[in-house]
Amino acid sequence: MIFVFALSSMLMGWLQSKKKPGDFNRLLYEQSIHWGCSLLVVFGAFSILPAGKLMSETTGLVILLILSLSTCLDGLRVGCRFSLTGLFLGFSVIITAYLDNFMWLELVLAMAIVAATIAWEIWSHKKSQTIKSQND
């Protein structure tokens, strides 16, 4: 999943660089280091597994927390939706750790985040239209 999120964030950065003047090469460099470090930490978590310090179930949760943190922090660079995704992943870890039947709660949480995002976009679009019509 690190590769999926890394490629997604690089794609978002590339699309944003078309709209805003900026140095895409610098963004690509920063993204590569960010996600490369995340991948190294994931390999570190996997390397502890054979030593018996972590069980396979807890290693999965730790890796999901790493992905959550990486995604949330990358949202500061490429957009708040990435941060929301990271927060969702983090809450998913907590829900999974405490509940046996976690899928329904995570589905409700995901739908709430999507609904809130859509409502925010509609509200901000209406607000910008109002401001634009007042300026004209």
Image (tube, grey):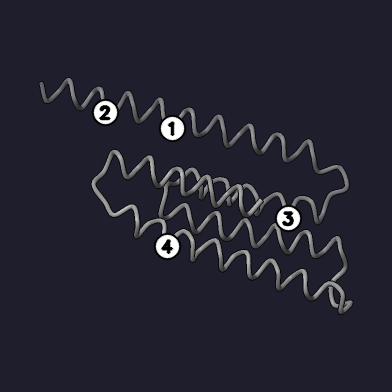
Q: Which tag is nearer the camera, tag 4 or tag 1?
A: 4
- Residue at image position (71%, 61%) is 63
Label 2 secondary element = helix
- Badge 1 or badge 2: first in the primary sequence: 1
Q: In which quarter of the image is residue 14?
A: top left
Q: Mark 3 points at which residue?
A: 94
Distance from the alpha carbon under mark 1 to that under mark 2: 12 Å
Amino acid carrying mark 1 in the image: Trp
Q: Name the residue under label 2.
A: 128
Distance from the alpha carbon under mark 3 to that under mark 2: 37 Å
Q: Where is residue 122 in the image (x, y as percent from the top left)?
A: 41, 25
Q: Which tag is nearer the camera, tag 3 or tag 4?
A: 4
Q: Mark 1 points at which residue?
A: 120
Label 4 secondary element = helix
Q: Label 4: few (<14), some or many (≥20) within 10 Å? A: some
Q: Label 2: few (<14), some or many (≥20) within 10 Å? A: few
User: Which is more toward the observer, 88 or 3?
Assistant: 3
Distance from the alpha carbon under mark 1 to that under mark 3: 26 Å
- Specify the label residue 108 is tagged with: none
- Residue at image position (63%, 32%) is 111
- Badge 1 or badge 3: first in the primary sequence: 3
Assign the C terminus to one quadrant of the image: top left
